[in-house]
Amino acid sequence: MQKIRGDFGVINRYREYLPVSEATPIISLSEGSTPLIHAPTLSEMVQGNIYLKYEGLNPTCSFKDRGMTVAISKAAEHSAKAVLCASTGNTSASAAAYAARAGMQCVVILPAGRIAGGKMVQAYLYGATVVAIKGNFDDALRIVQKLGERGDFVVVNSTNPYRLEGQKTAAFEIIEELGKAPDLHILPVGNAGNITAYWKGYREFYDVGRSYNLPIMLGVQASGAAPLYHGAPMDHPETLATAIRIGQPASWNGAVGAVKESLGEFDMVTDEEILAAQKWLASKEGVFAEPASVVPVALLLKIFQSEDHHLCRSKTIFSKLPLHPTIVLTITGHGLKDPETASHTLSEPLQAEATEEAVLNVIQGS
Ligand code: F0G
């Protein structure tokens, strides 16, 4: 039989490492197998080999699709009719898409006024029932967990263990591509599921002998929403990186375990540093990522290019790495998810009459 494209999602690629069986219908949009892009400017700055795992190239433009294919496939296996999630935008987009694919109802609970435009459009277009609450993500997740107890909905937040099982496949892909685990892995942390999942993936491949090393895990938060950095939940998280505007991460223990076991660290960067890093990454490396996704880049710029480097708790990690270390940064979501936040960089285009001479004059005069 001809292989259809949907056969190449993460479940088929890593079936033996995932909790699926012959009885599991595979609901896939060909997620995963994202590029690991070498970043020459960052590499020179850090004197190492820096790679960007560009998860913005998944079907709904964020890393969430890896976990969602497993969560929705398992929900379908158990004949679920409806799924439910709280979200800062990307989980809801992904849940809505995979639920549409499975013919299930999808209900998403979002903090009103705090979801980037692209993500909101996705939820509606994929046909989700969208409920905006007068509260933040932590309130939304609390409500979702309570509603989940009623049994009418399957909760597809990362409290659903199938989500993390799917997300760990990003670590598998990195090991397969590099031939080993990186020396250091840096990623943004919000609800803390992804750092938990990556560490699980790295550990599993290490345990079965598919890599001989484990990375140091470095989780980065926005300074206004940095509960793991401070070691205590926050009641009023605030950051323009709305995807990680979270004060009470659900996977707290998993994230702390990953950092402790890998001898890593949590660090944080300010909103100004995030905006600067977003523009820097696009204009120096050609990669456009949403604000939450560039916090690892902001941290590297702070440590290697700023006078504020002494403020970075994770600085000492870099002095312990081998010469010319291999470092992977997860770029969790595409920049087009949230064009509004980047629009501060826009200026009026140069104006010209519709002739070659006029256009050339304007270019030369600029
Ligand atoms: N980056 C992006 C683009 C995200 O959307 C998220 C989380 C994270 C990083 C942090 O990952 O929560 O696993 O630590 N977004 C969730 C959502 C909360 O609802 O879309 P995490």
Image: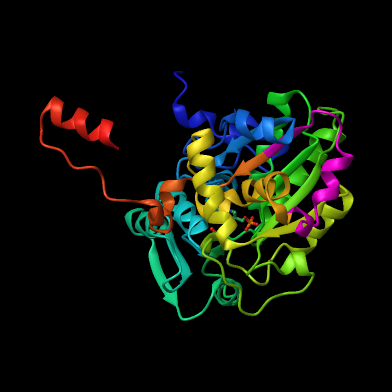
Residue 252 appears at what percent x and percent y?
Answer: 75, 64
Asked if the magenta segment contains residue 316, the reply would be: yes
Q: Is residue 176 above or below residue 225?
A: above
Q: Give the residue drawn at x 48%, y 55%.
A: 95
Residue 152 appears at what percent x and percent y?
Answer: 52, 69
Q: Nearer the viewer, residue 136 or 311?
A: 311
Q: Give the color scheme: rainbow, by chain, secondary structure or one colour.
A: rainbow
Can residue 334 be spotted in the picture?
A: yes
Region in magenta: 309-328
Q: Which residue occupies the extreme left position in the image?
A: 354
Q: Is residue 256 above or below residue 76?
A: below
Residue 83 appears at what percent x and percent y?
Answer: 50, 61
Q: Nearer the viewer, residue 361 or 158?
A: 361
- Where the C terminus falls, by quadrant? top left
Can residue 74 be spotted in the picture?
A: no
- Image quarter for residue 364? top left
Q: Nearer the viewer, residue 106 or 34?
A: 34
Residue 137 appears at what percent x and percent y?
Answer: 55, 71
Q: Is residue 6 above or below residue 329?
A: above
**For this view, does 41 lie left or right of residue 96?**
right
Q: Give the residue drawn at x 56%, y 36%.
A: 32
Q: Give the residue drawn at x 15%, y 38%.
A: 352
Q: Is residue 334 above or below residue 268?
A: above
